[in-house]
Image: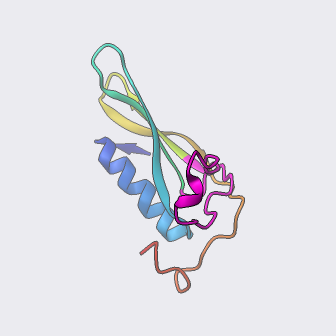
Amino acid sequence: MKFDTLQQGISFSKNFARVSGFDTRLYSTKKRKSDGKISLKYCVCNKEGFRETPRLHAEWKKKRPITRMGCKARMTLKLINDQDNYVIFSFHEGHTHPLTTPNSDQHTK
C-alpha cells in the first residue's frame, strides 16, 4: 500500500488498529543523514514492550496498572527514495494479548 505522506500512513495504521480491536502508539523514527527526512516510522501496538523498572523514589508515585505485555504487533512505514511516498515496509499481526470487540472497548473509538 502506498501513501503520499507519512501522516496518511500513520492515520491508516491507527484506523486499521481501531477496527481490528487494539490501539497503537508511535514508537521510533529513523531519519536520513543526507536531508533529515524520515525514512522509517514504526507504529506499534500500545501493549508492545515492557515498562521500565521503577527508579529511585518510585514508592512515592502512584501505582500504575501493568499495561505492556510484550506484544510484537507492528507496522513499519518506509520512505520510497525516488518518489517521496511511503509504503508499508513490514507488518507483524501477531498479538500476545486478547483483542477487544467494538462494543466492549471505549478507548479505541
Q: Residue at x 33, y 42 (%)?
A: 6
Please identify the dominant SS of the magenta region. loop
Rendered position, 97 above or below 41: below
Locate the N terminus by quadrant. Answer: top left
Q: Residue at x 63, y 70 (%)?
A: 99
Q: Residue at x 32, y 50 (%)?
A: 8
Q: Nearer the viewer, residue 32 or 70?
A: 70
Tell me if 4 is positioned left or right of 93 in this view: left
Q: Is residue 22 magenta?
A: no
Which residue, as the protein is rendered here, is positioned at the far bottom?
Answer: 103
Tell me if 70 is positioned left or right of 17 in this view: right
Q: Position of residue 72 (x, y in %)?
A: 66, 49
Tell me if 30 is positioned left or right of 74 in this view: left
Q: Is residue 53 magenta?
A: yes
Rendered position, 26 above or below 85: below
Q: How many numbered circles does the render carry? A: 0
Q: Position of residue 15 (x, y in %)?
A: 42, 63
Q: Nearer the viewer, residue 28 or 50?
A: 50
Q: Position of residue 13 (x, y in %)?
A: 45, 54
Q: Residue at x 41, y 75 (%)?
A: 109
Rendered position, 8 above or below 85: below
Q: How is the image coloured?
A: rainbow
Q: Which residues are magenta?
A: 46-74
Which residue, as the protein is rendered here, is positioned at the far top?
Answer: 34
Picture quadrant where residue 34 is located? top left
